Amino acid sequence: MSGFSKALKLNSIYLGVEENVVKKRFPQGLLGVSGVHKALVIHALCENTGKRAFVITPDEAAAGKMVDDLVSLGTSAQLLPAKDISFISDQTRSREYEQQRVGTLANWLKHDCKVVVLPAYSAVEKTLPPRSLAAKIRTISSGDEMELDLLLRT
């Protein structure tokens, strides 16, 4: 347990938030503190309870900063960006945001990250249902062989 997590265990307000998380009283909000302090509380909650978290921020800049803060504290966190709005042909636009979104959600399903941070407008965008995404996840390592037809069907 980190020193931050130990120190927060002495704070009655933090203990109330932790109790709400353990008892699954959601959503939880933390108002009146800076982003880095919110990151410290999220880090401690994940560490002290063993739970994972989805964290909603006002915008993508705040979400990116939150991810950076959490990672610097030692918590595995990833950004779920908003979908890329594009007015150009579907064939010529980049799929980078879609790939990042699917990658983040896949890592969440595989328990490869502890916290997913997303801007509020990303939280209301449609995604694949978890079961559908989980059924489509394939891990291919260097040297593996896979039938092309099987890969294309998934």
Image (cartoon, rainbow, N blue to C red):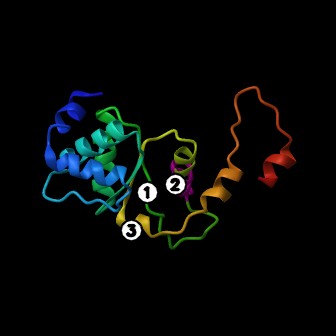
Image mark for residue 81 = 1
Left or right? Give the position of 107 relative to 39: right
Residue 45 drawn above or below residue 93: above
Q: In the image, what residue type sits under mark 1?
A: Pro
The crowd level at tag 1 (other Cα within 10 Å; few <14, some 14-19, many 20+) is many
Query: Residue 8 is drawn in which quadrant?
Result: top left
- Residue receiving disc 3: 121
CA distance separating discs 2 and 1: 6 Å
- The residue under the point 51% across, 73% down is 87
Q: Secondary structure at mark 2?
A: helix
- The residue under the point 36% across, 41% down is 49
CA distance separating discs 3 and 2: 13 Å
Q: Earlier in the sequence, mark 3 or mark 2?
A: 2
Magenta-drawn segment: 94-104
Helix, strand or loop for the magenta stretch, by majority: helix
- The residue under the point 29% across, 48% down is 66
- Residue receiving disc 2: 101
Image mark for residue 96 = none
Residue 146 x %, y %: 82, 37
Q: Are marks 2 and 1 in contact (CB under 8 Å)?
A: yes
